[in-house]
Amino acid sequence: MNERTDRIGDFRDDWPSTEGGGVRVSVVFYPADFAVRWSQCSATADFFAEYFAAVEACRSDDPAARDEFIGTLSYVVNELVENAVKFSVGETVEVTVGVEDGELAVMAANQILASTAPPLMEKFRELLAGDPHELLFARVEANAEDPEAGASGLGFLTMMADYAARLGWCFAAVHDNPHNVLLTTMARLEVRKP
């Protein structure tokens, strides 16, 4: 993957922008400088969810709709942050959430070992190839039969099946480290206002 950039799924390079009234917020973690705790990932997810629940493009006066929005965004951000922090081999993990034109995007960018990129690409293609509800059910059943097998892909499948998230990934060269690849995961959600 020297100078190549590979995209899988519903990944958009140009989104979200802030030029047409969109809102974008980013947080950068430095996992090498401190031990990231899972509670910090959850707190990050809650921050983004509460912040964007107050943004005009997402705000709802209906308490049930607001709670649903916060729950959805918190789940999606938490999943992406946990994955990025857990598998990062670089110095930073950048999390960005933005909204524009009735669509919310969550992105998490982290470096991974270049040698892990091809099997990861294949795994992501498999996740997108089937029906997310059927794949989720099959994965849950497989995990129940063999708890040691792990829940690999369960969070992505839940995002697609339960929250109608459109997922995409971008694998890009890291110019100052040919042993690593920059992986950016994007989850896009429709903002439903009552």
Image (tube, grey):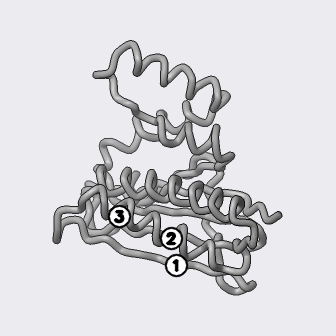
- Residue at left offset 42%, top offset 63%: 109
Residue at x-position 35% and y-position 66%? 93
Q: Position of residue 191 (x, y in %)?
A: 73, 63
Residue 55 appears left or right of 62: left
Q: Which mark is residue 48?
A: 2
> Does 35 sit left or right of 132 as displayed?
left
Q: How many marks?
A: 3
* Dot 1 and dot 2 residues touching (CB under 8 Å): yes
> Where's the C terminus, which quadrant?
bottom right
Q: Residue furthest front?
A: 63
**Front: mark 1 or 2:** 2
Q: Residues within 10 Å of mark 2 (few under 14, many from 20)?
A: many
Height in image: 32 above or below 127? below
Q: Is any atom of residue 5 visible in this view? A: no
In space, the residues marked 3 and 1 are separated at their CA atoms by 23 Å
The residue tagged 1 is: 25
Near-viewer residue (40 or 96): 40
The local crowd at label 3, few if under 14, some if 14 to 19, many if 20 or more residues have their Cα within 10 Å, is: some
Q: Tag 1, which secondary structure?
A: strand
Residue position marked by numbered label 3 in the rendering: 174
Q: Is residue 16 left or right of residue 140?
A: right
For the point 42% across and 39% down, the residue is 120
**Callout 3: SS:** loop
Q: CA distance from mark 1 to mark 2?
A: 8 Å
Residue 186 visible: yes
